[in-house]
Image: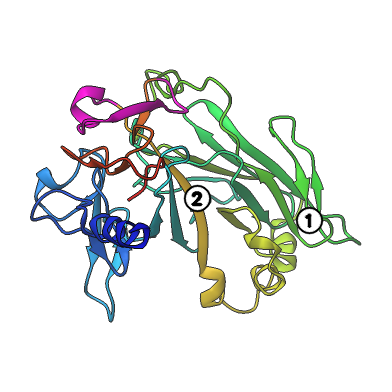
């Protein structure tokens, strides 16, 4: 009897819908549960959660937006820690002036007041090069900053920057690391001045302050990455990134990043649609996620999405 009940429940769970009726719920082997959605039909997703399934190649790829530089690998099924595992194509491209200074954005897909943020403490800023400083800002809030110095007779070393929130360096390898941290009690609405322009959530700044830029560039290439912690610890990748005589390998171009997603700007009653669902306060002011009440399972964002009284965790 217990075996029959267990199998029956498993079969019921497998057939539970994860998305809206007649909407695509997978791409390239990645499940796409509502509030996420694919395609032109706006009823398939909550505003801000539209994804793109690129079918032009040999296999489908799930993309965060039309830029095509961020591929979605997995959408977390944990309501307590709602994450997206994504992969960015290469380093942050920064056009610099004659003095080696420039500004760029991490991704236009991570928009101000949108659902996605860089997961705090799970990503880091990585900088290679000599006598350069890289900074990641969200509006007027500095999330990470680091400086890499090179002495004439030594490999590059880290210089602790006062604006860094946490600091650490690989030491003597031409690269600096520092955690990307969102301050506690962060209010995204207060992070931008009235004069702020653009829509990207994360700005990346690069500054050079050496004496001989040509000589610095001959020693190590200047590259800026935002990556999941531990990615650069791969020896083959770290060596590849410090080479100046050949382009980066395909492996080094596939940069893992962890994003956090939360609902912002939508009334709770219209988002946590299912009976036996509830909301959890998010990390940003006014943000939240939904989950099935204890003892129920399924998708709380769908009408009647939370089913049964087994088990007690919310998952898709």
In the image, residue 249 sits, relative to residue 269, either above or below, namely: below
SS class, disc 2:
strand
In front of the other: 254 or 172? 254
Q: Which residues, given as a range, are shown in magenta?
A: 265-285
Residue 56 at x, y percent in the picture: 22, 74
Residue 287 at x, y percent in the picture: 37, 26
Residue at 51% x, 76% y is: 250
In front of the other: 259 or 130? 259
Residue 253 at x, y percent in the picture: 51, 69
Residue indicated by mark 1 = 170
SS class, disc 1:
loop
Residue at 60% x, 40% y is: 180
Q: Could you give the CA–CA distance between mark 2 and mark 1, rounded to whole angstroms?
A: 21 Å
- Mark 1, residues whose alpha carbon is within 10 Å: few (<14), some, or many (≥20)? some
Residue at 34% x, 47% y is: 109
Residue indicated by mark 2 = 258
- Mark 2, residues whose alpha carbon is within 10 Å: few (<14), some, or many (≥20)? many
Q: Is residue 273 visible?
A: yes
Residue projecting furthest to the right: 153
């Amino acid at each position: 009897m217990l075996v029959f009940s267990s199998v029956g429940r498993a079969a019921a769970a497998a057939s539970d819908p994860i998305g809206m009726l007649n909407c695509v719920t997978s791409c390239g082997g990645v499940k796409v549960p509502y509030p996420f959605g694919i395609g032109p039909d706006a009823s398939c997703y909550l505003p801000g959660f539209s994804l793109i399934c690129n079918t032009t190649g040999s296999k489908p790829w799930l993309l965060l937006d039309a830029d095509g530089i961020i591929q979605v690998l997995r959408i977390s099924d944990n309501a307590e820690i709602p994450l997206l595992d994504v992969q960015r194509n290469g380093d942050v491209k920064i056009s610099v002036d004659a003095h080696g200074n420039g500004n760029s954005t991490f991704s236009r897909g991570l928009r101000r007041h949108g659902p996605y943020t860089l997961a705090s403490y799970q990503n880091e800023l990585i900088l290679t090069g000599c006598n350069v400083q890289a900074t990641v800002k969200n509006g007027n809030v500095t999330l990470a900053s680091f400086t890499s110095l090179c002495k004439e007779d030594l490999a590059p070393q880290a210089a602790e920057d006062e604006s860094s929130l946490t600091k650490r360096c690989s030491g003597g390898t031409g690269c600096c690391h520092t955690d990307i941290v969102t301050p506690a009690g962060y209010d995204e609405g207060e992070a931008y001045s009235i004069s702020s322009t653009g829509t990207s959530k994360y700005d990346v700044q690069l500054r050079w302050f050496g004496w001989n830029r040509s000589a610095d560039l001959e020693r190590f290439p200047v590259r800026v990455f935002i990556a999941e912690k531990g990615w650069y610890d791969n020896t083959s990748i770290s060596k590849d990134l410090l080479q100046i005589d050949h382009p980066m390998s395909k492996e080094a171009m596939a940069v893992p990043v962890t994003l956090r997603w939360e609902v912002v700007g939508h009334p709770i009653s219209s988002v946590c649609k299912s009976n036996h669902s509830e909301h959890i306060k998010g990390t940003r002011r006014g943000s939240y996620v939904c989950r099935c009440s204890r003892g129920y399972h399924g998708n709380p964002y769908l009408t009647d999405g939370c089913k049964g009284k087994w088990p007690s965790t919310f998952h898709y």
